[in-house]
Amino acid sequence: MFTLGLSTPRFSDEALFKEYSEAGILNMEVSFGNEYCEKLDFDELKRLSEKYGVNLYSFHLPFYPFNKIDISNKELADYSVKYLSSLIKKGSDIGIHLYIIHASGEPIDENQRKERMECAKSSLKELCQVAKENGSIIAVENLPRTCLGRNSSDIKELLSADSSLVVCYDTNHLLGQDAIEFIKDVGDKIATTHISDYDFKDERHWLPGEGKNDWQAIIKALLDVGYNGIWLYEIDFQCPWTIHRDRDLNCHDFVRNADEVLNDKKITIFSTPNENL
């Protein structure tokens, strides 16, 4: 049905590539904070990818700290576009051709949204040109709370910046819109996913089954709009404070969870929510 992938839950050393390969996860999203991206050895990533047969499927462009990287902030946009463009060029050189981007940081006051939206669209247009020149595309991710991209209306406005833009659908970011409504409204612009669960109160990045998402309804909606791409988990191995697990996750847990969710089997749960949420 879908192709399994996993966003890097820790720095991509050789041991992690080996774990991916042994578990049968053959697609990796490179996703690091700004501090790692600044010193990232792209040639080493390519070497490890080829050695272990793990495809470098996508690259999640850094978005934090918000006071340094924010394509919607006119005071930071020029630097942000220049910096992110450099990463797109380096990643494209080693064969990564899909780039996930956050359209803004936060918080954003309601009276600032129009100005921030226009700045984000201008930045996206510039970045799309860089991506095109390097044979790549950019996927705008839906985001929570006050961020730009918090619903399908926001997403479609952002997509209007350039016809090449597509969407990364994050299954734990929608706080003001139903998931099925979002999927139907965005439709065939969904080109990749970030899979995780949540409690509908805030983003949690829990394993599917630990939260409230109706996974069979989400799968059906994705198939109905023609999506048959990657099922890419964006979840840390380590347990967040918002939930209690008996142990850290490993690559095999994601393989099992994907089999259970995608085949409508009973989902293995070894966690309990934090009572203080």
Image: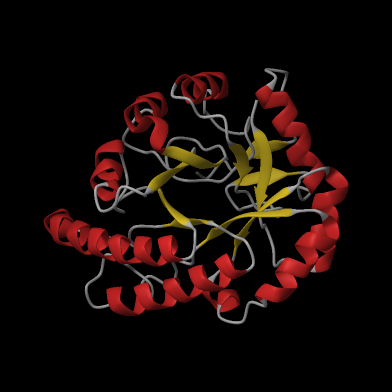
Choose top left, top right, bottom left or bottom right for residue 32: bottom right
**Which residue is more in the foreground, 209 or 41?**
41
- Kindly tell me whether residue 210 is visible in this rendering: yes
Horizontally, residue 215 falls left or right of residue 268, namely: left
Point out residue 43 in the picture as x, y percentages from the top left corner.
Answer: 70, 75
**Which residue is more in the foreground, 272 or 198?**
198
Q: Residue at x 55, y 80 (%)?
A: 38
The correct choice, above or below, for 76 with respect to 218 in the image is below
- Kindly tell me whether residue 269 is visible in this rendering: no
- For the N terminus, the quadrant is top right
Q: Residue at x 27, y 64 (%)?
A: 72
The residue most toward the right is 22
Disc tally is 0
The correct choice, above or below, for 81 with respect to 105 in the image is below
**Which residue is more in the foreground, 125 or 30?**
125
The correct choice, above or below, for 141 with respect to 69 in the image is above
Point out residue 143 in the picture as x, y percentages from the top left corner.
Answer: 38, 48
The residue most toward the left is 111
Q: Residue at x 56, y 73 (%)?
A: 90
Point out residue 188 in the picture as x, y percentages from the top left corner.
Answer: 41, 31
Q: Residue at x 45, y 69 (%)?
A: 64
Horizontally, residue 62 falls left or right of residue 267, namely: left
**Which residue is more in the foreground, 175 or 116?**
116
Q: According to the image, what is the colour scheme of the structure?
A: secondary structure
Point out residue 141 in the picture as x, y percentages from the top left corner.
Answer: 42, 49
